[in-house]
Amino acid sequence: MKVTLQQHGGIAAGITRRPQTLDGDRLPPDEARELEQLVAAAAESPQPEQPQPVRARDAMSYTITVEHSGAIRTLKGSDGRMSEAFTALLEWVEARLARSR
Amino acid sequence: MNNTSSFGHATNAGRNLPLNNTCGMRCNRTSVSCIVPPHILRRLIEKGAKNLSQDAFRTLLTTAGLRGERSVRAAVAFAAAPAHGRRTISDCRQGRRLESARIVRTEDGAPSADPAVNRAFDFLGKTRDFYKEVLNRDSIDDRGMRLNGYVHYGNHFQNAFWDGLQMVFGDGDGELFDDFTKSLDVVAHELAHGVTEHTANLAYHNQSGALNESLSDVFGSLVKQWSLNQNASEADWLIGAELFTPSRPGDALRSMKAPGTAYDNDLIGKDPQPDHMDRFDALPDTEDDDFGGVHINSGIPNKAFYLTAIKIGGVAWQAPGQIWYESLKASSTDTQFQEFADTTFSKAGLLFGAGKLEQEAVAEAWREVGIRVAGAPRAARTGVSSARPAWPVSASGADLGLGEAVPDWSARIEALGAELQRVSREVAALRAHA
């Protein structure tokens, strides 16, 4: 499983933010399983609908692309508008990416 | 902390609940099962239920999903006691659920041991004071709306945002970005989004969205300049200069003076902001493309404000700030660059006299960024007259020339009053230290 995080927008929207990839195959087995569970839960919890009118300002948005067994799945969330499961996945991925830097 | 209100629904006293999770409970996607029926809320408002606390009103608003209705919010504000921008700072403790944050400092409470908490508290206060003393505006909604700030949001969160009800700040990653409470202009920028929402409510996409962003940069910078008592020529006109870590000295998020020059390095690329309409970037109106580049194309009106301030001279929060504030209030959801420019030209004439230094400066500033305001003379001028008129402008109609509009005296008197208060405070401070 390969997970790629791409950030967009925010108050620093102009800066270049490069996608960051986490290779699940390089994780310890227990963490790899945990990642799979988090992905599955996030996939089952779609992003809450955008309220109209949009009121959040300078919110960042996040695209998590999951490649697994030949399939590609895209999950999305944004500051103030993300499911709990997506939040958990995002925070987990961000922490692992920070650790690997 | 959740408490059950008398309506049998979970509340969160003192909080403005987050946009996407009205009650902190598991709700249906439509949230229908989690709201107080609107007809009950309206009846309470009509009856002026003064026995309900302001916190209860706010909880009712958030759980009723009516917070987007400005008329309802305004009606409730009349029934509730004015808060005069009282501040509450909450610590998210690296979480992303605002309802789980812990209140760590209140308006009358002692300073915290946490510098981020104190910075957010102090900077919200400076911003609130700016709006009151310079623009005679009582907090975000001009009715004393509470100022709620949330710090330590997320883990190494590299952002600050306004969620429609409150301001949220991350700690940065410590490599590229520092704590987002370290920048006064960023704190003021976020609060200014609330002011815009309660005035023009500029739609957050394309040109109106870029104006929305620009106005937050304008007033963010003005708060900083006011706090430092800087002339327009002394100010750095940078947004977020304090956010980058010491390893990245000299960078800022944006430059109002020179859009496109705030940063240029291998890590984060080159500042993409344009400084002229010829370089307007018509990005797609999607979340991933910054809703049509609202943080990108804001460079154009940002530059126009900077030029206006420099051409007028003195401190930017006086004439330029007054013109832009009045223009913000006169704008609407779909206002585009041209219309806003025209409004600033008109307001400059009303406030300071048609054909005077201020109005000429506004017209020239917009012309330099590629927008010709309606009503400005087509003939080229050699430059803004260096002769400053007496301020305020004489009341005699003859001084304004034939066919020119009578100035907006109420706005001028209000501006003079604010300036008098500021000067009186400075004199009092000098005497105290004499």
Image (cartoon, coloured by chain):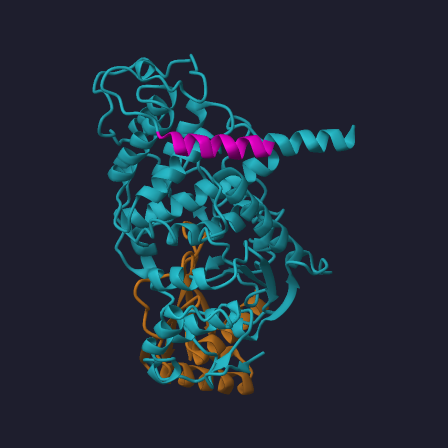
Q: Residue furthest front?
A: B47
Left or right, residue B204 beside residue B174:
left
Q: Residue at x 66, y 62 (%)?
A: B105
Total numbered badges shown on the rendered structure: 0
- Where residue B354 sits: x, y (%)? 31, 22
Per the rendered image, the range of residues in magenta is B408-422
Looking at the image, is B97 positioned above or below residue B144? below
Q: Residue at x 34, y 47 (%)?
A: B210
* Main secondary structure along the magenta-highlighted residues: helix
Asked if residue B369 shows in the view, the reply is no
Left or right, residue B331 beside residue B16:
left
Q: Residue at x 34, y 39 (%)?
A: B327
* Front-most of residues A17 and B379: B379
- Where residue B16 sits: x, y (%)? 49, 68
Q: Quadrant of residue B165?
A: bottom left
* Front-most of residues B366 and B357: B357
* Front-most of residues B249 and B240: B240
* Front-most of residues B335 and B271: B335
Looking at the image, is B132 positioned above or below residue B117? above
Q: Which chain is orange?
A: A
- Where residue A3 sits: x, y (%)? 42, 74
> What is the quadrant of the N terminus of chain B in the image?
bottom right
Asked if residue A95 shows in the view, the reply is yes
Q: Quadrant of residue A67?
A: bottom left
Looking at the image, is B12 positioned above or below residue B375? below
Looking at the image, is A14 positioned above or below residue A32? above
Q: Residue at x 46, y 35 (%)?
A: B414
Q: Residue furthest right?
A: B434
- Where residue A29 sits: x, y (%)? 54, 86
Chain B's shade in the image? cyan
